[in-house]
Image: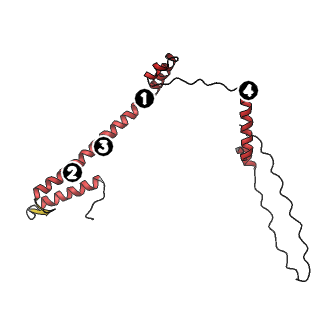
Amino acid sequence: MANTPKKNRPAESAAEQKLVDGLTKHAQTLASLMIGGVNMASKDIIANLQALISSANAVVSTRATWQNSVAADTAERAKLKTFVSGLKQALLVAFAGSIDTLADFGLTPRKARTPLTSEQKAAAAAKALATRAARHTVGSKVKKSIKGTVPAPVTPSPAAPATTPVAAAPAPAAAPAPAPVPPHQS
């Protein structure tokens, strides 16, 4: 067993309680101890240790109370979430034209969303296709159909005598161009 306990509250409290138990058991042989240059009686040492233990116990009970309060608040907020959302929506409808009144409730008016014209929609679709082609992105069905090919291994030919000229090997054929990527279909 180590002389210094782990640095957590329950371990420290247990170690302090063992000190109290030991001092109580040996109170007759240890009437007083010199601590920090001050001669202290065993009963004063035990009183200080009991204060530490009481303080630690108060923290534990307070923490449990706090955790219960947080859990209750979370449950209450979850229960009333739709109510608060409905209230905000009702206020936004009731005071749609009055920015100052909405500000009193901490709300801002909804922004009007202008619909896209057919030309803007067509331009956005063309831009999306161009981006997809530039990034070479494809859908899951096309990815599944793409298979890799392994080139045939090249075997070295036996060495020719140094006096015979070696004919140059023909240049390898250029790799075929990749097929165009079809647009993603949902």
Check contact, mark 3 vs mark 1: CB within 8 A: no
Q: Amino acid at mark 4?
A: Ser
Residue 171, quarter of the rendered image:
bottom right
Task: Kindly tell me whether residue 108 is visible in this rendering.
Answer: yes
**Which amino acid type is marked by label 1?**
Lys
Q: Residues within 10 Å of mark 4 (few under 14, many from 20)?
A: few
Is 52 on the left or on the right of 6, as rendered?
Answer: left
* Residue linked to disc 2: 53
Circle 1: is it few (<14), some (14-19), or many (20+) Cα within 10 Å? Answer: few
* Mark in the foreground, 2 or 1: 2
User: In the rendered structure, which disc, 3 or 1, sits on the residue that comes first in sequence?
Assistant: 3
Answer yes or no: do the residues labelled 4 and 1 have beta carbons within 8 Å? Answer: no
Mark number displayed over residue 79: 1
The type of residue carrying mark 2 is Ile
Question: Mark 4 or 3 closer to N-term?
Answer: 3
Q: Nearer the viewer, mark 2 or mark 4?
A: 4
Depth check, mark 4 against mark 1: the one in front is 4
For residue 118, which numbered disc appears in the image? Answer: 4
Q: How many marks?
A: 4
Front residue of this view, candidates 118 and 31 = 118
Percent coordinates x, y for residue 38 in the rendering: 12, 61
Circle 1: element type? helix
Q: Residue 63 has which mark?
A: 3
Q: Secondary structure at mark 2?
A: helix
Q: Quadrant of residue 140?
A: top right
Specify few, some or many for label 2: CA neighbours under 10 Å numbering under 14, 14-19, or 20 or more.
Answer: many
